[in-house]
Every structure is written in C-alpha cells, then in structure tokens.
Image (cartoon, rainbow, N blue to C red):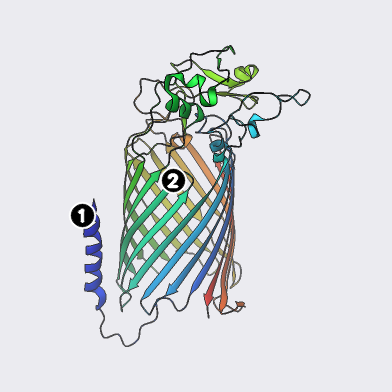
Amino acid sequence: MKNKIIFLFTLISTVAFSQESDSTNVAYKKRVLEGIEVDFLVSYYKQDGVHSSVSGGIGSEKLTDLASNIVVAIPLNDDDVLTVDMGLSAYTSASSSNINPFNASGASAGSDDDDKAPVTGPYGTPWQASSGASAQDVLGSAVVNYSHSSDSRNFIWSTNVSFSNEYDYTSIGFGGGMSKLFNNKNSEVSAKANVYLDQWRPIYATELHEYAKYGLGFQNNGFFNGVTILDQNGNASTSYLPSDFKLWNSKNRNSYSLSLSFSQVATKKMQFSVFFDILQQQGMLSSPYNRVYFADKANYYIGQAQYIPVYETSQNRGVYQLADDIERLPGTRFKLPFGGRLNYYINERLSLRTYYRYYWDDWGITSHTASIELPIKLTDKFTVFPMYRYYTQEASKYFAPFETHLSTEKYYTSDYDLSTFNASQYGFGVGYTDILTSVKIWNFGLKSIDLRFNHYDRNDGLNANIITFGIKFVEQ
C-alpha cells in the first residue's frame, strides 16, 4: 500500500508539472482567491430512538451534539490557496452511557417508586442514561488542504492532511486530488484519493471487561464482588459466564477511498454531474462496546427482579441484562457508491437541485438515496431552501434484532444502522448573500449568512432534528 501511495502522489505531481505551463501566453490571470475567507459554522443535533446498539438493539438512543467549525481559506499567491478547517463537537449520549450502566447516580440512583426509600446496590436500565465517563465526550478535528491552479485555471491539484481525536478513537488522514477543465470550462473531470489510518482505544461493557480481567473468578472480584446476579426468574445465580467474549487483538481501522467524477454544463439552464467511488476498509470494523445477546443462551441480570418481565419496554426502570458477547463483524469491507446530480435553472427566482446515489457493499447492504431542493430567490440578497430527502436500505447479512442471533454464528450485530429501514428528511433554510459585502467588521466584509433546519424520521423509531448556522466573511 505504501508503494501505491507514493505512486499516487508522484502521478499527481507529474501531471501538475505537465499542466503548469499549459497557457504560457496569458497576459493577465485573475487570482484564484482574492482575499482571506473565513467561515464560522455551528450546528445543534438532537435525536431519540428505541434501538440502542450498546444495549443490544433495545433502549434509549437519546443524543445531543453541539458542533462548531471555523474554516479559513488563505490565498498564498495568485495560484495557491491554503485552507484550514478546525472543529469541536461535544455530545451526550444515553446509549453510550450504558457501556457502564451500573453507577451510583443517573439510571442507577433513586428508587423505583417516589414513595419508597432509595434502592441500594447497583442497577441500571437500557431506557435511561447512566452517568459513566462514556456518557459524554468531545471530538476535536483539523483538516489542512493546499490547492494549486494552473495559469489557465484549467488544471487544479490539491493535497490534504487531517487529524481527529476523541476519548476512545484517533484518526489520521491524508490524500490528494486533481481536476481538469476543458470545453471552455464547461466540462470537468476530477479524481481524489484519501487514506485514513485510525486506532481504537477499546472500551468494553462492564461485565465483559471484568470477565476479561479476572477470568473464571470474576464474580468474586472487582465490580462483581458482593453483587447479586439474577437469572430469568429473578433468583440469585452464579451461572453467568460470557465465554464467547474475547478481547480484540487488532485495534487499527484503515480506510482507503478513490473518487471519480465528471460534471458538464449541458445548456444555459442545466448542469449535471456523475460520480463513482471505491472504498476499502480493513481492521477493527466492529464497535467494541456494542452488546449482543444470543437466543440459545440463558439470560442474566443485575438490578431489580420485578422489572425482568418488562425488560424490553420503557416500563423497565431498574434492571439490566448482562451481555453474551460484543458485536463481531468481518475485518474487511468493500463499498461501491455511485450516483449523480442534476441542477436546472427554471427562472430568475427558482432553481431545481436533485441528487441520487446507489450504494452496495460486501456486507450485504444496498441503499438508495434521492433528494430534491428548490432554492427560491425572494430578493437579490435573500433565498429560501425547501428540501426533501428519502433513503431506503436493505439490511446487512450480519444483522439480527435483540436476542435472535445464535452463538454458533461467526459474525453478528444488533446495530440498527445495519438493519433494513427507510427514512425521510424534511428541511428548510434561509440564505443571505451580499456580493458587495456592505457590512464590515475590521478588515472583513460579511458575504453570506445561512440558517437551516432539518427533521429526520426513520421507520424504526429513530427521529432527529438539526439546526445549522453559517456565516462567511471575506477580506477587503
């Protein structure tokens, strides 16, 4: 792979050099970017659902995420632009909080009835958030991109590096791309390649972590020392033994992608583009904290026995089922998405933007995505953006719902992102654009403001809302 990467960048550099002087007689060329541009982006995301992957396919999926980005594009000279994108994302998650559901607060505090004394001893429930360290986290990321345009502006090449980090995961990426314009800049072909070298710092469910640490004597050590385990009938038991669980040997996840695209201005009013991607992943592709429960294994719990009969409903306020194993997925995944866009200028007030993508991978998932957006120009400066997006997916061959996998299977997951479902997304936005940048702050003029709201509904019970706000300034 290393030799392939070296060849790729050699190819990019060679083609760039050959194209550098494709217009040596240009008397005047416009700068690619006239001045520094700064984008501030903020988004707030909130979701809820009933299929927590951490709890084996049932339980609360409540999650909130507040993200912000600053993107700075700096012209280095007439031809070269350096772009830096830095972001922070802070989230809280009921689902991931239940990696350790047995805490002294959160889901494990209080009593099962307001008129009773607080319950002693650990307990939890998939339907409420716990208060462990995994209940919240901050993701930091940075992407640096350098691009160069030829004198004729008919050839562009770029390189990029990226880094992101959160509590249990780190990603390092790099890549490059090139674009060639021809036919009086009415046609464009592009190719991009990226490599991401990621590493897990695995966090396992409490019961599995203790089993891995202490072995067969785990019920008398660590967290389990003095803790009562219940069987399906609510009786104390010492038979719980997650013998299928083993720690992951590999902690790396590497991803490689190649993207090819072609765009064409077909008429004065119509433009279209097509794309084709090839993606390969290898390494630890499972999430180490996603529990799996087997249909051919007995059930064991920690908490309050009276809630065992209603375990799979939100009436369960005080018992948590112990895992049989974590999800196990193949160490490779090959993906092939392709699709296209069609934009049509209807009149000076109304445009049409459409998008379609087909997706296939060797885990058995196929999907279709289609969207439509109708930008309506109310004035020279204000535009509204109603949109609709539809998505449908066929399940992975490794997916099965809560407690339906068998321990004899090689691969298994109850993550509903890999299930069969369809989803609709409705959105509306308002945009403000001032090409004269009449509003100024210091040496920067306000170029645009964008505010959007989207609502997402999935037929498996997941729903979400997201608000995004963006503002752009340009150097004067």
Residue 150: quadrant of the picture: bottom left
Residue 325: tell me if it is visible: no
Using the image, determine if residue 423 lies above or below residue 42: above
- Image location (x, y in percent) of residue 119: 69, 24
The amino acid sitting under disc 1 is Asn
Residue 416: tell me if it is visible: yes
Say which label, 1 or 2, has the lower sequence index.
1
* 395 relative position to 388: left or right: left
- Image location (x, y in percent) of residue 441: 61, 76
- Image location (x, y in percent) of residue 196: 35, 51
Q: Which of 364 and 372 is in front in this view?
A: 364
Neighbourhood count class around disc 2 (C-alpha, 10 Å): few under 14, some 14–19, many 20 upward: some
Q: Nearer the viewer, residue 201 or 422?
A: 201
Most distant residue in the right direction: 115
SS state under label 2: strand
Q: Which of 247 and 324 is in front in this view?
A: 247
Neighbourhood count class around disc 1 (C-alpha, 10 Å): few under 14, some 14–19, many 20 upward: few
Residue tagged 2: 169
Residue 263: quadrant of the picture: bottom left
The amino acid sitting under disc 2 is Tyr
SS state under label 1: helix
- Image location (x, y in percent) of residue 120: 67, 23
Using the image, determine if residue 349 lies above or below residue 196: below
* 34 relative position to 146: left or right: right
Residue tagged 1: 3
Residue pictured at 43% horizontal, 37% vertical: 287
User: Which mark, by number, is residue 128?
Assistant: none
